[in-house]
Image (cartoon, rainbow, N blue to C red):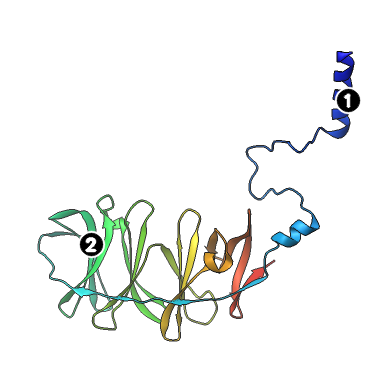
Amino acid sequence: MKKLVLAELALLCLITGCNGEDEILPANVTVNEQSPTSQSDTAETSSPSSFNLSYEEVNMTPLNKINLSKNRTIITSKILDHVTIEIYQSDTDKEGILASLVKNFNSYDVGKIGYSGASEVSDFTIDSVDVLSKSYIKITGSDGANSPITDYISTDSMPPKLLRIGAHTVEADIDQDGIKEIVATEGTAAETTIYKFVDKKIQAMDLNKIMNAPVVIYDSKTNTFQAEVTQGNLSRWKIEDGKLQHLS
């Protein structure tokens, strides 16, 4: 009798597939492989087709004058826009890598731009970039393996002013208005912020916050953004007509 019951159960499994509610999915299923949903579920999880832009004002920091000590080791330096940028390590403090700006025989403290584990010339960049409607000196370094530092320095005022961003950045005209913005991305989950010159002020917009998305990635090749607006899926977006617009 017992054998007959087992045989009947085996036959039932062949017919139904044995797909009960307690089926265990494979461990390697990715977030993009979603189970079919009902029409009501689809309506609840569908993403909006656009988002309004919302910027907040960002203040630049005036640089303080300093007296540069002769007891320092210069790692790299560069002359740009009639000023000298120097990246160095103090002989009395081996913990951090510092940066300074010299203009009209006055020295200004840019601050920490690196750490003792990154003290090679290749660990830093110094460039002049056109962004936010004018020219800035851009310095990059890091405060750790996953802690990038990007400085934008305006030298057309006295004292010079600093915009420090703890992220990797690119300069791009994301809204096609003829002026390049700063696109800053940080973190393994990709948090992206846009810095824009609005009403004669620098303002910032946190795209993750605006879109309520844990991941937002900028694609410089297409000048678009990929965002996880719907959980487990990346969708593509572009800034057009004053909004973030969804692209099919």
Point 55% across, 77% down: residue:
175
Vertical placement of 225 versus 231: above or below?
Answer: below
Label 2 amino acid?
Answer: Leu
Spot the residue most to the bottom: 199
The picture places residue 15, in percent across and down from the top left corner, at 89, 31
Label 1 amino acid?
Answer: Leu
For the residues labelled 1 and 2, the Cα–Cα distance comes to 75 Å
Label 1: which residue?
11
Secondary structure of the residue carrying numbered label 2: strand
Taking 125 as reference, is 175 left or right? right
Taking 227 as reference, is 76 left or right? left
Which quadrant holds residue 170?
A: bottom left
Vertical placement of 41 versus 6: above or below?
Answer: below
* Comparing labels 1 and 2, the label whose residue is closer to the camera: 1
Count of labels in the image: 2
Label 2: which residue?
98
The picture places residue 158, in percent across and down from the top left corner, at 24, 83
The picture places residue 36, in percent across and down from the top left corner, at 77, 50
| Mark 1 or 2, nearer chain start | 1
Vertical placement of 62 versus 145: above or below?
Answer: below
